[in-house]
Image: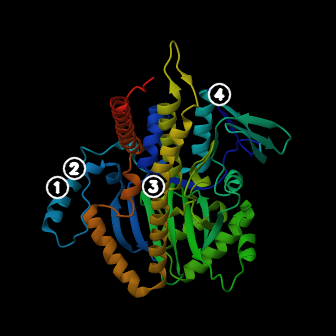
Amino acid sequence: LKIVVFEQAPAFHDDVGAGMGMYPNGLRVIRDISPKLLERIQQAGCPYQYRRWMRHDGTEVAVADETVLTRPESDQKHDNNIFSLSALDEAADTSSSSESLDPDLQPIGIRRWRLQKILYEAAVEAGIDIQFGKRLDTLKELTDDTISLRFDDGTTHATRLLVAADGAKSKIRSIATKGACTLKYTGTTCLMGTSATPRADQGLSLPSSLTTKCHGAFYPTGPSEQCFQFHFPVDLEKESIPTILGGWGGMTHHMSQEECEELAKQLEEEGWHTEKFLQPLQNVEKALKIGLTTLDPPLKTFTFRRIVLIGDAAHPPVPYLGQGAQQGLEDAGTLAMLLKRFCLVPGYPNPSFSLDRVNDALELYNQLRVPRTTEMVQRGKLAGEQQQKRAENKKYNRVREEMIKREIFYNENSNHLFPGVKHDYKEAVLDLLTTYDRKVAEQEQQRLEEARTHQLVSVPEEE
């Protein structure tokens, strides 16, 4: 099996991009690839001990223990009945138990480039051919099972299976769907950046401000550094899309300092807590602005003959639950398991790889991943909308804060998080394969019975 990775960047560079979170459902995939790889990633990041919902002035609304996210689904108590005495007893019974916690899957914050570097080095060690400076020009299906890629440097490559992980602006997706879906701006622009200041509260903080009418996220990516995000709604009736789009992208260090210092002064006047939220802005290393977008309409299939979309190419996320990268990892783990099941042919001394049954693998990939990722994108949108409503409506904020407190009391963390982090991609694949095998067995049994019936009713023709 020959694997080639084409990357449009001219080379790998340190210190590119901001930060990101890694959660148990994504870390499970990494661990299944290699426990040592997971250990390297954990060491390069910073664990989240707590998750705090806050107001912009530093007031804590609720605090959750992030370690409970590593507890298996069967051990987690989710009871939305706030009047249930049994729920109170169960919460008391489970909150103090650490026996079922899985420290390998502790959520972490990590700089994006550090994660990419570790994965790149692991791929090289595994003998995978990675070619830089390969920007796709055209894609053409030569036959039913062969795809030709042409790059803008004039080189070409033919493949029998193309896995497209080329991001939210995927050119391969655009070609495969014939432009049937496009990125739609959600109306929110995010200013994110990194700062060489430690996060004293040992975890993720989610402030919301009724004065600034925005909300944010702050999380550690190392012992002495953190990442910050500010989510600003944009009035599309007052600002045109081209004007907004023109302000997106990375900034130079000087531009980052100027923009963040100006924002810090504005937020200070509006009562934001200096140490918790303004110091990162005042000590920014780099920053960028991005417009949050989702696919319109969402894809109903991630496979197009021998083309498979994974990650942001298939389902661009919003960042409010930290599930973007995790869903991409689930995609990869699911696809790998299904290809192994249908395409790996036993043999001595080594098995071989055949794509004769790849369509079976891709059909099941769609059955699993389309509904799963659609749900996660929708849950992420809801989480963001609720945070923004906290910043816009005083009455809603008061009610929502009370709901958050009750969620944490009964469930130990936010109900928004559990469907994402508790998911085990391997169990999902095995469950579907069990159903698939049973259906195949039933079809074979029916075929045999029909053949037997046909034999019984068949009468030889008279000469």
**Mark 3 sits on what residue?**
372
Q: Which mark is residue 97?
A: 2
Q: Are marks 1 and 4 in contact (CB under 8 Å)?
A: no
Q: Are marks 2 and 1 in contact (CB under 8 Å)?
A: yes
Q: Which mark is residue 114?
A: none
Marks 4/3: CA distance?
30 Å
Q: Residues within 10 Å of mark 3 (few under 14, many from 20)?
A: some
**Mark 4 sits on what residue?**
2
Q: Earlier in the sequence, mark 1 or mark 4?
A: 4
Instruction: Indicate the quadrant where residue 407 lies.
Output: bottom left
Which residue type carries mark 1?
Asp
Helix, strand or loop for disc 2: loop
Residue found at x 50% / y 65%: 217
Q: Earlier in the sequence, mark 2 or mark 3?
A: 2
As rendered, which of 450 and 137 lies closer to the eye? 450
Q: Are marks 4 and 3 in contact (CB under 8 Å)?
A: no
Is any part of residue 388 visible from this angle?
A: yes
Residue found at x 52% / y 20%: 351
Q: Position of residue 365 (x, y in %)?
A: 50, 45
**Mark 1 sits on what residue?**
93
Which residue type carries mark 2?
Ser
Helix, strand or loop for disc 4: loop
